[in-house]
Image (tube, rainbow, N blue to C red):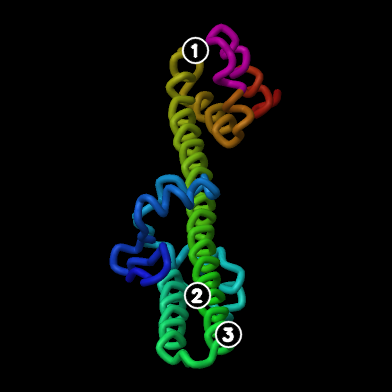
Amino acid sequence: MLNHSSAFGWNDVEKCIITTKDVFDDWVKSHPAAIGLRNKEFPHLDDLMFVWEKDRATRANAETPSDAVEEMNLCDEETHTFGHEKDEHTECQKDEESDHANQAIRKSEILDSSIYSQVCYCCYEANEEMKGISTYFKKQIESGDRKMKIYDELIKLFEFSEQEIMDVGQDIFNDEYKIDNFFALSKAFRRNYVIKHLNEIHPN
């Protein structure tokens, strides 16, 4: 749905903010973070705004982008109604209604800017959250891969029994610091490292 007198609108089917390229290019000069967002789909925008908008915290006066654009349309309709009801014979009424129309236009422009700012902010926050989640899972995968290699590396030392390998492997396996230390050592030093741990596990 495109606001008739506003430069921006919200397409509730495509879940994106719509505007002409010229208007967007002019607007993005003062909002560089919004580059690339014209006609970009935001299928989960309502959910994101539920999380981040201040008024969502109290569930008071909560408003979706389509609600905001609808409100702009209502403002426009009020403006058109004022225009049809003008008293052409009263100059004072003309000036007063003109002021109302200008205020409605300014309000629409503010709402347009507010919606786009909220979209940019939500996209930025969502992107940061996804980066954090991606980093976390990457570390978990790397840690899991190294843990699987511990026993392979211990077996390569040959001189230790299966029970000794299992005891040392379990001891190292449960401590990230010990895992880092084990893989930091060259193979020549790993033998002494294993002996040290065996003495700690089974002191004489």
First of labels 3, 1 by sequence position = 3
Query: In the image, is 6 to the left or to the right of 198?
Result: left
- SS under mark 2: loop
Residue 173 drawn in magenta: no
- SS under mark 1: loop
Q: Residue drawn at (53%, 44%), measured in percent from left and top?
A: 132
Q: Which mark is residue 96?
A: 3
Relative to 159, residue 169 above or below: below
Residue stretch rendered in magenta on the structure: 181-194
Q: For the residues marked 3 and 1, what is the alpha-carbon distance in whole angstroms?
A: 97 Å
Residue 184 drawn in magenta: yes
The quarter holding residue 106 reads bottom right
- SS under mark 3: helix
First of labels 2, 3 by sequence position = 2
Q: Which mark is residue 63?
A: 2
Q: Which mark is residue 159?
A: 1
**Closer to us: 76 or 200:** 76
Q: x%, y% of residue 133? A: 49, 46
Mark 3 or 1, closer to the camera: 3
Relative to 130, residue 188 above or below: above
Q: Quadrant of the C terminus?
A: top right
**Closer to us: 52 or 192:** 52
Q: Residue drawn at (50%, 24%), measured in percent from left and top?
A: 165
Mark 2 or 3, closer to the camera: 3
Q: Amino acid at mark 2?
A: Glu
